[in-house]
Amino acid sequence: MGILKIAVNNFSFSFDLAWITTFFPTAVIVTVGFWLWRLCSQVVFYYLKQWAENSEIMWDGVLLPMIEALTPLLIILTSLALIAQLSFGVNLNGIWVALGGASFIIGFTTKDILANFFSGIVLLIDTPFQFGDVLSLEDGNLGIVQKIGLRVTQIYQLESHTQAYIPNSLLQAQQIVNLSRPITPIYYTVPILLLANCDLKICRQVMQEVILAHPDTIGDIDSKLSLIDKYFNWEESGTSFQIDKKNGRARLLAEQKVNLKLKEVEDNLEALVLTLEFLEKGGLNQDEIDTIQKEYQNILDLVGLEFCEMPQLGQKQKLSQRKRYQSIKLEETNSNSSLISLIREWYRRSLQDPNIVDEDLYLLPKIWEYQIDLLKKRLRRLLVYVLKPERIETRLGKQVNELVYWLQTRFKQARNRCHNPDVCIEHNIAGSSAIFLKFSLNYYVDDIRLEGGNRGMRVNSEIYFEILNHLQCYIAS
């Protein structure tokens, strides 16, 4: 501005140029503000959304829309203030002082709201829990995360079957145990006493098979299917307990298909990593790029996704990475043997369990549709780079490995050997009339989120009753 005034004063003009000193800074401020907004909307927000999708941060649906709405308002207000001060000489010091005082008063009177707001931002970014996770709060209540808002977090309390809205500042200050991580099934250790004269080998085998035969415990599915008809014949024994073995077997068979298809997807992803490691040694030509894209297309077919309204694989694209990402759409196929279809068949079978409560009819589909949506986002993001692998060929293998790790740890918990039930002898206990052996039954109950949080209690009761039915003569009275 000073240079412009000097230039104007050193030259004589036949007309008044005072308007230049007003128009020029205004034009500069408007131009800078416009391009700053373009930069934020076209670049900053785009990469923030990509980062949020890749890291499963839940603020892409809560915090980002608010930032996108407030950013243009802040740019406009700042631009107007600069124009008023630089172009028209308006003294804004009084306004700034007044705003500072008002901000102090507003901040003091709304300190609790602001504390909850910033605590909500921290929870959204750190993601100590996400939708569907089971939390153990400091007061001992168990709850399922429904939604993390900017002020409160919505939690469904299992014991009271109510919705709790906990201020984020209080939630952040608590010591919270996430029972859904690292795995969704819940671990139980149940003691049981048998007479010391029992046949240890037979009794241990019976207890282990009883646990494994229950449809709601974690274990090798083939073994569970072979044992499910051997135990839990409570209808024949005339007791009040009943179990729908037909539904239990159908659920296990449906889950077995999901596991096999998921393993097939993981194997194909790992094969793609090997292909990338082999081809990347000498750089990628068009034939090798086509090979990578065909392998990825096969993976999408296994999952049950197809392209829609996008450039076909193998064609050279001149779109920018941002436009290419926005142009890619994946839609579900009608294949009944795809991973997505098998998952839906599995959780629908689970909803037919006679022990399911009304809340589960809403919760279980929402949890799995959320997981399916995350899978689509990850596959879509990876497809952007598969279309043009020569640009990030040294990082593509790493990204595929990250997808495999996510499938194995966060998408659906694999049934590992360490999750199989186990029966251990702890020690002897001397009673008034006999000596007893204390056994420890160790097993995982699948998905405590169902049945209002009472699934574990029901499974424990049914397992104990079945052991009592088979080892009644050895059970300590």
Image: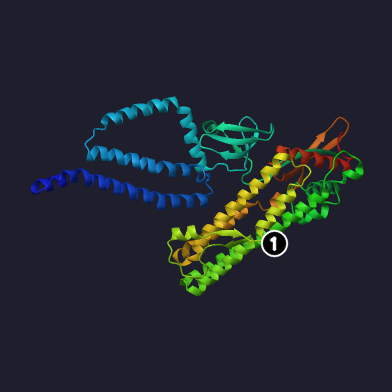
| Residue nearest the observer in this picture, 15 or 25 | 15
Which residue is found at the position 44% from the left and 52% from the top? 47
> Horizontally, is 346 left or right of 28 in the view?
right
Which residue is found at the position 50% from the left and 49% from the top? 52
Give the residue type that dot 1 points to: Ser
Which residue is found at the position 72% from the left and 53% from the top? 346
Q: Which quadrant of the view contains residue 471? A: top right
Residue 222 in the image: x percent, y percent?
Answer: 77, 57
**Crowd tier of the residue under label 1, counting other residues whose Cα lies within 10 Å: few below 14, some 14–19, many 20 or above:** some
| Residue nearest the observer in this picture, 147 or 274 | 147
Which residue is found at the position 61% from the left and 50% from the top? 371
Q: Is residue 183 at least partly visible in the picture? A: no
Q: Secondary structure at mark 1?
A: loop
Task: Locate the C terminus and report the quarter of the image it occupies.
Answer: top right
Residue 297 in the image: x percent, y percent?
Answer: 58, 66
Residue 355 in the image: x percent, y percent?
Answer: 77, 42
Residue most toward the front?
Answer: 15
Residue designated by label 1? 337
